[in-house]
Image: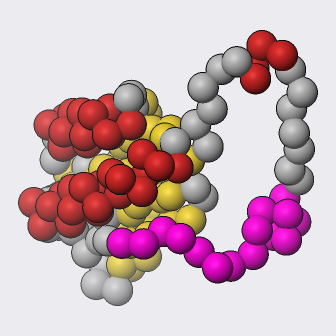
Amino acid sequence: MDITTTGPTIKEKGLHTMTINNAKLKACIKLSSKVTVYVPATNGVADATDNTEQVKKTAALLADLFGGSTSTAALGYWLSPVAGLVAENTTVVFAYASDEDLQNGIAAVVDHCEALKNEMGQEAVALEINGEMYFI
């Protein structure tokens, strides 16, 4: 998967960009990319399941690739062509990364999402990269 885009820049999308002038921050490591995997908590469309192991695997992968990860519980809604509106507990696992690390690690993340999709019988697994959503 190539995440390089030729679309509008942040400024062209109407979002405010600024340079932060702070001497202490200039000495810090800056991670400008964010990768988020939405780990489902169902098998198939609506059969609730414990996703603890899938969350741990996802968190470990992101930590290995990007140096750390965070997870948080969420309630997501999506429209299934088979079942209509589905409310689903999900766990959002994310990591911040340098642009170089993101390029080097994104193939492993996409492969992981495909494995989650198959393992959990999902129509898709959501992957968000820098605010853009991909349904794997």
**Coloration of the structure image:** secondary structure
Residue 57 percent coordinates (x, y): 19, 39
Q: Is residue 129 left or right of residue 29?
A: left
Q: Is residue 133 among what the camera can see?
A: yes
Q: How many numbered marks, from 0 up?
A: 0
The residue lying at 12 percent from left, 67 percent from top is 118
In the displayed structure, 103 sits above or below 67; it is below
State the image quarter where residue 117 is shown: bottom left
State yes or no: residue 8 in magenta.
Answer: yes
In the displayed structure, 122 sits above or below 17; it is below
State the image quarter where residue 46 is shown: bottom left
The residue lying at 31 percent from left, 40 percent from top is 65
Residue 93 percent coordinates (x, y): 39, 41
Foreground: 132 or 81?
Answer: 132
Q: Is residue 78 left or right of residue 81?
A: right
Residue 24 percent coordinates (x, y): 77, 13
Q: Is residue 73 among what the camera can see?
A: no
State yes or no: residue 112 in magenta.
Answer: no
Q: Quadrant of the C terminus?
A: bottom left
Residue stretch in magenta: 1-15
The residue lying at 84 percent from left, 59 percent from top is 15
Q: Quadrant of the N terminus?
A: bottom left
Q: Is residue 23 left or right of residue 79?
A: right
Residue 104 percent coordinates (x, y): 35, 53
The residue lying at 65 percent from left, 20 percent from top is 28
Main SS category, magenta section: loop
Outermost residue, bottom side: 81
